[in-house]
Structure formats: structure tokens, C-alpha cells
């Protein structure tokens, strides 16, 4: 299953939400449960394919709805708490609808050594939110509400994608932007929150 929201490939991101069957309104639990089963049954109950099945769900809905956890738990014979814990462990999986624009903060050593943590803190302060995903300060598994209340901007932890020559960097809707200074980070956060994300996206070569 293609990892359609993988930062390194930028195949599809929240900015192209029309490609996903995003759940924006009230959920019909019966219909949702049936659709979830249709998607994950082909992967069987072998937990070695659990992550693959979760990526398939995320590709379908744009995220993994919390309301789907019960159906997933029944399929694998696990408790909902176990399933939520598994999903929460992986930074690339989301249990909330994606923001209109997403900033992925690179947690790699090259970015950290060149001021990446300061870049992150500047963005968090400007946007008034905390990063979601694995904790940037080595608190693995820590999660936070990484999106502005209006859903305009999401800020998430991400692993290094190998473009260390651009450190310190972030990925804006899947596109590498860097190297950045703290001033750049503040300006970017303000612009993206104001609907001006395109001004920061690199021009395709």
C-alpha cells in the first residue's frame, strides 16, 4: 500500500484533501465500521501487517477516525486501548482530521545541530500550539494537539528524510523548505496561518 502521506515522497498531503474521503461531518458508526472492515480484512489478522493496514485506512479517510478504533480492535482481537496505543506510536499516523496545511518538523540530528529545536519552538510559540507526534525532546510517544483550533495549520514531528544539506528544515505540505532561521520560522508560521502557504513552497525545477 503506498504511504500516501509520506513526507519524503509528498505523494498526497492534506492540502490535496479532495483525493481523500475525508470525514468532516457526523460519523455513521455502522457505515464506518463496515468500511473499516472492508479495508483491513484483506490484510488478515497478522500483526506484522498492522501498519500496512493502518496506512490503507489513512489513505481512505485522510486520517484514522477514533470512531474506527473499536472495529479495528475487534478485527485483531485486541482491546481498543491496545489499538490506540499502537496507532499513537507511529508519528505518521493521525487520529484527527488533517489540517489545511501541514508543517512537518525534521527531528534528524543534522537539523537539531543547526538549530532545529529553536526553529520548532519559534513555530510553536507563533502558532500557539504544541507539536504532535513523537516528542522532539526525545520523549518518544508523546502526543499533543498539533493543529490550530480552526484547522488551518498542523505541526507534526517527522523523521529525517535525508535532505540534510537543507538543514535546519521543515516540510510544508510535503515540500522541503530550508535552511531556515528562527526569523524565517516565525514568518512562515504567520504566513501559513494567514493562508499564504504558497509563498513558501519551492518552485518545481
Image (cartoon, rainbow, N blue to C red):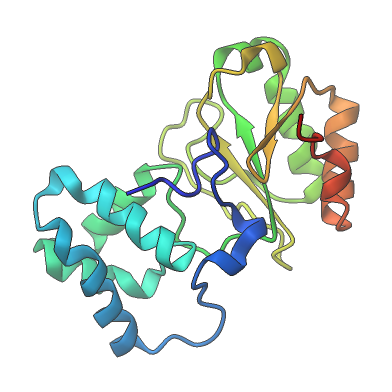
Q: Which quadrant would the C terminus be assigned to in this image? A: top right
The relative height of residue 66 versus residue 144 in the rendered view (above or below) is below
Q: Is residue 13 visible?
A: yes
Which residue shows up at 45% across the image and 61% down it? 95
| Percent x, y of residue 41 | 15, 66
The relative height of residue 127 versus residue 176 in the rendered view (above or below) is below
| Percent x, y of residue 141 | 41, 39
The relative height of residue 139 versus residue 199 in the rendered view (above or below) is above
| Percent x, y of residue 84 | 31, 58
Which residue shows up at 56% across the image and 13% down it? 109
Left or right of 97 in this view: 31: left
Q: Is residue 79 visible?
A: no
Left or right of 148 in this view: 73: left
Which residue shows up at 45% across the image and 42% down it? 91
| Percent x, y of residue 13 | 59, 52
Left or right of 14 in this view: 161: left
Amino acid at each position: 500500500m503506498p504511504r500516501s502521506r509520506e513526507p519524503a515522497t509528498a505523494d498526497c498531503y492534506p492540502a490535496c484533501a479532495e483525493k481523500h474521503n475525508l470525514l468532516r461531518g457526523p460519523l455513521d458508526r455502522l457505515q464506518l465500521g463496515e468500511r473499516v472492515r472492508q479495508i483491513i480484512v484483506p490484510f488478515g489478522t497478522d500483526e506484522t501487517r498492522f501498519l500496512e493496514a493502518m496506512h490503507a485506512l489513512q489513505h481512505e479517510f485522510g486520517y484514522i477516525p477514533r470512531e474506527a478504533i473499536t472495529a479495528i480492535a475487534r478485527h485483531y482481537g485486541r482491546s481498543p486501548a491496545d489499538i490506540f496505543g499502537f496507532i499513537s506510536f507511529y508519528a505518521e499516523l493521525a487520529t484527527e482530521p488533517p489540517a489545511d496545511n501541514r508543517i512537518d518538523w525534521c527531528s534528524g540530528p543534522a537539523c537539531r545541530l543547526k538549530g532545529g529545536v529553536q526553529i520548532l519552538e519559534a513555530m510553536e510559540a507563533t502558532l500557539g500550539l504544541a507539536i504532535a507526534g513523537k516528542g522532539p525532546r526525545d520523549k518518544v510517544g508523546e502526543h499533543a494537539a498539533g493543529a490550530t483550533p480552526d484547522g488551518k495549520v498542523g505541526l507534526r514531528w517527522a523523521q529525517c528524510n535525508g535532505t540534510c544539506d537543507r538543514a535546519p528544515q521543515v516540510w510544508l505540505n510535503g515540500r522541503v523548505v530550508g535552511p531556515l532561521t528562527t526569523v524565517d520560522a516565525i514568518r512562515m508560521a504567520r504566513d501559513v496561518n494567514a493562508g499564504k502557504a504558497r509563498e513558501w513552497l519551492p518552485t518545481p525545477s
